[in-house]
Amino acid sequence: MRAHDERSIDDIAAAWVAREDRAPLPAGDAVARDAWLQADVRHFGAYARAHAVLARTARARALSNGTAALAADPAPPRFRRSRRVLRWAAGMAAVLSLLAIGVHRQHDDAEYYATRRGEILRVPLEDGSAITLDSDSQVRVHYTGARRSITLLQGEALFDVAKNPGRPFVVRAQETDVTAVGTSFAVSLNERRSGGVEVLVREGVVDVADTQGAVAPARLLANYRALANRSHGIRIEAVPAEDLEQQLAWREGMLSFNGDTLSVAAAQFLRYSDTRIVIDDPVVGSRRIVGLYSASDPLGFARSVALSLGLVVEQQGKVVRLRTPESAPHAAHSMQ
């Protein structure tokens, strides 16, 4: 693909993000956006990048607000104009919080880090490594001279590991150990297909092993995933680079779905928000969706998929229901 094609995709994605910030998209435009996102997997990546650039710039602006540095803006004119669009990122403030709860040292001389629902935390470690914690996640960190030990107690985390061959970096999640020297990989306890541990490698190589030696270990390369469960062993799958970045979109406060059911998507949003998406009809819940959505906006997600799938949205407090028009008794008063 030629370079100007990539630029065109990025420009279109940036235009959609800018329009979404200015005002809610009309129904027809929202459908057009969703169709564009579904047309090519590269569109998802460009859309995520556009949101990520704006969100990162918004956070940088917020942190430097009121300082002299803000006056000397080296950004190109196009990005300076885009900062007016960054009000969209304010809605992600809860998701992208840089504050963690439960950051403390216990009697075992380990440090514990945790995030509340809706928070994302990046933790710099003493050796130059870093952990990015997803919403409602917990880790235990214990370093010795010979080993860097991390225990994922809950949720999901991305590990960017500083290289040190003489001091392995080992992440334990349930009955699985993931060992790396210098790489970038994610470990999740939220995996639903296997009910076990998911390991996703962005860079480098990691070794995945059962802590009791009951399952043969596996070596995992970049752009591969391992699903580890003692009942079925360690299953390895290739992951295209575009899909991998989509699956890590939570780092920027986004959720990506590529053929997932509505029921699965609703469960994912519950990890980031107190607003609950309820789908009473299992047929509706089995409908499959494709799209990239703000993790902190379940109502916006519900409205978008309702437009795409011909459903009705009903909101009562922190409960949002998705129904077919036929099953919605008060459809005339529903929000679409």
Image (cartoon, rainbow, N blue to C red):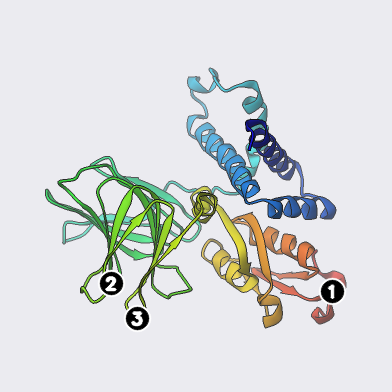
Name the image quarter holding residue 108: bottom left
Answer above or below: position of 45 versus 233.
Answer: above
* Residue 164 location (% of width, % of height): 20, 43
* Residue 170 location (% of width, % of height): 24, 57
Task: Name which residue lies at 71% across and 77% down.
Answer: 284
Identify the image quadrant of the C terminus: bottom right
Q: Identify residue type, mark 2.
A: Glu
Answer above or below: position of 16 versus 230.
Answer: above
Whole-angstrom CA distance, mark 3 to mark 1, is 46 Å
Whole-angstrom CA distance, mark 2 to mark 3, is 11 Å
Answer above or below: position of 109 versus 266.
Answer: above
- Residue at label 2? 175
Residue 28 is left or right of residue 304, and the answer is right
- Residue at label 1? 331
* Residue 270 location (% of width, % of height): 55, 67
* Residue 256 location (% of width, % of height): 58, 57
Q: Residue furthest top?
A: 72
Task: Name which residue lies at 62% across and 47% down.
Answer: 42
Residue 295 is left or right of residue 143, and the answer is right
Q: Identify residue type, mark 1.
A: Ala
Q: Identify residue type, mark 3.
A: Ser
Residue 323 is left or right of residue 319, and the answer is right
Name the image quarter holding residue 78: top right
Q: Residues within 10 Å of mark 3 (few under 14, many from 20)?
A: few
Q: Residues within 10 Å of mark 1 (few under 14, many from 20)?
A: some
Of residues 220 and 268, the one nearer the viewer is: 220
